[in-house]
Structures are given as C-alpha cells and as structure tokens.
Image: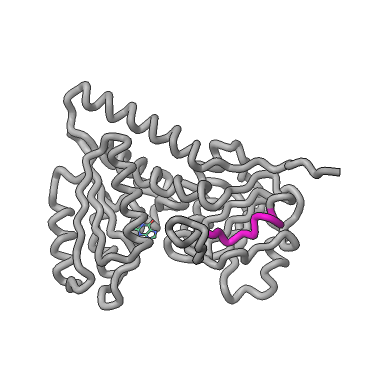
Amino acid sequence: MVETKKYTLIDGRKVAADIKKEIADRVDELRREKKKLPHLAIILVGDDGASTTYVDGKVKACKEVGFHYSLLRFADTISEERLIKHIDQINNDDDIDGFIVQLPLPAHISVDRVTERINPEKDVDGFTNQNFGSITSTHPLILPATPFGVLELLRRYNVETLGKHCVMVGASRLVGAPLSMMLAEQGRATVTICHKYTKDLSEHTKQADILLVAVGKPGLITGDMVKEGVVVIDIGTTRVEDASKAKGFALKGDVDFETVAPKSSLITPVPGGVGPMTIVSLLLNTLRVFEQRAH
Ligand code: GUN
C-alpha cells in the first residue's frame, strides 16, 4: 500500500510573498501621497559568503517592496572605533528609519558593544537589550525579527499556541532565547528550552506539541524523537557541500525531514520555510518604525 502524505508543508515563500505584497501596497500609497518612503540601511563588514548572500536577499527585498535602502560595506580590517562612528552617523541620519549590522563580525570587534550602540528605535533586527527586554512589555516597539517571523508563520497557518507545549531546542541570543520568551508571552504557551547541556534531548522533544529547532546541526532531530501530530518549525540553515548544486552547497535544516515529516501535522521545509520570513520581518519592523515616526 502506498502511504499518503498527511502532513502540511508550511510554505514560508508564499506567506513571505503575501506579506511583501501588503508592504508594497502601503509603499505605493505613500508614493501616491508624495510622502517620504521607508529607508533601511545595512552594514556589512567583510565578505563572508553566507553573510553576503543574506545581505543580497535583504537588498533584493527592499527593491521588491519599494523601500529606499543603503548598503554600507567595510573591509574586515575596520576598527571597532570606526565602525561605531558609522553607527553614530546612521543613528543621527534623519532619513534612515532603521538599520542592521549583519552578523557575525570579525573577532576583533565586540558584537555587544556594536549592538548596544544602535539606537533601539532604529534597531529593526530587535537585537539591542532594550528591544530584547521589551518582549515582555505590553506594547513592544520592535520584536526580534526571526522569532517574529516564526510567530507570524504560526499565526497565518492557524496554529494555536495558547496552552500548548512548545519545546525550543537552542537558546541563542538571536533566536532561541527571544523566541521562547515570545512563545510564552505573546503565544501564551508552556515553553521548555533545551540547549547543548540538556540531558536526553529526546525525552523533551517527544513531549512537544510544537517543536522549534535553531541550533545549526543538520539532521539533529529524527523521527523517533517526536510524537505523532507535532508541528515542526526548523530554523536551522547550515551550508553543506553538495556537488550536484550550482553553488556547490545545499542548505540543510536541523530536522531530518524524511523521518520527521511523516509523523508531523505541519512542518517547515529548509529552504523555503522560516528563511523567507526572517527578511520579511525586517521589512515589517522597518515599516513599523517608519510609521511610528512623524514625517
Ligand atoms: N546573521 C545571521 N542572521 C542574522 C540576522 O537576522 N541579522 C543580522 N544582523 N545578522 C545575522
């Protein structure tokens, strides 16, 4: 007997395209009213392949929705002091609504010092301590972009989080930590956070109604580690050498799709799941801060 596919693929590309259309419509309206348009600036230090690809995607997205954008590229030899001077300039540039500093940074530059220099009102990645902390406030201005994208995907696929058991694997500052807090705060879920020191990971993952994974270890989660009907959100994106691909690599998630998908009710693919949503969240945050400022 041929087994029929019973899970639903969460199509991040489709949701991202729908949201971009909504943003582009708003930009058209502003243009018709001869108003200032949202302006996102992106700082890229060095020429790391993955970072360059991500930044290219962000620039392309700005063009698609009609945002103004500035791309500031610096050699990886730039000093922390000079980089901070550029950040101050952008903080004080009234035309720029929001900006990001693409990570990682070279080892001689402190991510903490650079991030904390960003004016929280322009921090559209939601990385500053102020925006991280505001997750628990009643009216957060900017929510961390990738976690915000995940919540938006769940919302658009009508996945109820209230009272559900979410298991977050990965506790990074950029994804796991803020996402678990947002699932508890905005999503009103019960949340378990697992990380590299967690003993017997599968004892936790098996209990998940919603399993979210962001560790960067391809295939970490296998079918025997999840229960039937689980909703799976795979936030991992690791480049794995693959000679059959034009670019010489394939993007792999943290979830072993072949064995996990048949047990799940909904699941994100990699690529095409969470990835497209991270960029769209950046656009949404930029539009949000733009609308908050008086023009
Ligand atoms: N590096 C990997 N992901 C991200 C992101 O979402 N924002 C920034 N600024 N850097 C990253």
User: Where is residue 279 drawn, in percent x and y?
Assistant: 39, 47
Which of these two is toward me, 125 or 139? 125
Asked whether 229 or 131 is in front, the reply is 229
The residues colored magenta run 251-260
Q: Position of residue 109 (x, y in %)?
A: 26, 74
Q: Quadrant of the C terminus?
A: top left
Question: Measuring 86% from the left and 43% from the top, which residue is drawn there?
Answer: 1
* Ligand 1 found in image quarter: bottom left
Quick one: which residue is furthest to the right in this view?
1
Task: Please identify the residue farthest to the top as the structure is shown.
Answer: 32
Q: Is residue 245 magenta?
A: no
- Residue 204 image offset from top left, x and y in percent: 69, 64
The answer to whether one can see residue 176 in this image is no
Quarter residue 67 falls in: top left
> Residue at the spot x=67%, y=69% of the render?
201
The picture quadrant where one finds residue 45 is: bottom left
**Residue drawn at the location 58% of the way across and 63% of the way down:** 169
